[in-house]
Amino acid sequence: MANLPRQDDNLQPSSKDNDLDSTSQQHTPRSSASTSSESIKAVAIYEVVKGVGALLGAGALWSWHSDLEHWLTTATASWQQTFGQLLAPQVDSAVRIAQQASKNWPVFLLLIFAYASLRFLEAYGLWQDRTWAYWFGVLGYGIFIPIELYYLFASPFDWFKLAILVSNIIIVIVVYRNMKRKGLI
């Protein structure tokens, strides 16, 4: 009977018990259910990179919209001199888009800023482990997979298109698996 604790002993924990509790809490990792996984953080970083790239494109359009034709001619010639025909279809496509953007550059700037804002918003939501960001990612990438498949098979083979398709499939799989792990699906 001497080993049984008295009722008074359980009311106030000693300072030593408090120290043990606080140190054990400091070393306990956060629950995986409340934090983003490393793979989701990688997708979020990818989204930030796309958003920054879009803003750099907007800055170039803003700076060079009046002289874009000259700049595009110079940049294309430099690319061909350095890399030959490497990514020639993509360069031609980017030139056509830039030529259209230079004609109506204020509208394109708004579209680019809207796109960058969406990328940053999704990155924030994924990093902060928000449910809406998971849905946004799966639907946002998943909706383009059939279109990318169509263009991959309907036009001449292009490694760049294949790389985009594969990266989008990987992102959908990563986000989907994390949604499943969290019980969102």
Image (cartoon, rainbow, N blue to C red):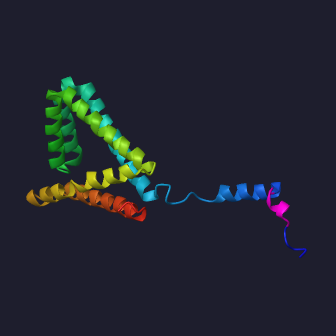
| Residue furthest to the front | 7
Count the marks. 0
Q: State the image coordinates of residue 105 (x, y, percent, origin top left).
A: 19, 28
- Picture coordinates of residue 184, whole percent (x, y): 38, 60
Above or below: residue 121 compared with residue 3: above
* Position of residue 66 measured from the top left corner of the image (x, y, whole percent): 19, 23
Q: Magenta segment range?
A: 6-13
- The reply to whether the magenta stretch includes residue 11 is yes
Residue 161 against residue 70 in the figure, above or below: below
Does residue 53 show up?
Answer: no
- Counting from the top left corner in percent of width and height, residue 53 is at 32, 40
Q: Residue at x 17, y 58 (%)?
A: 146
Confirm whether the magenta stretch covers residue 82.
no
Nearer the observer, 64 or 171: 171
Q: Nearer the viewer, residue 9 or 50?
A: 9
Q: Residue at x 22, y 39 (%)?
A: 78
Residue 127 vs residue 45, the one in the foreground = 127
Image quadrant where one finds the N terminus: bottom right
- 67 up-or-down from 82: above or below: above
- Residue 126 seen in the figure: yes
In the image: residue 17, left or right of residue 111: right
Q: Is residue 119 left or right of residue 90?
A: right
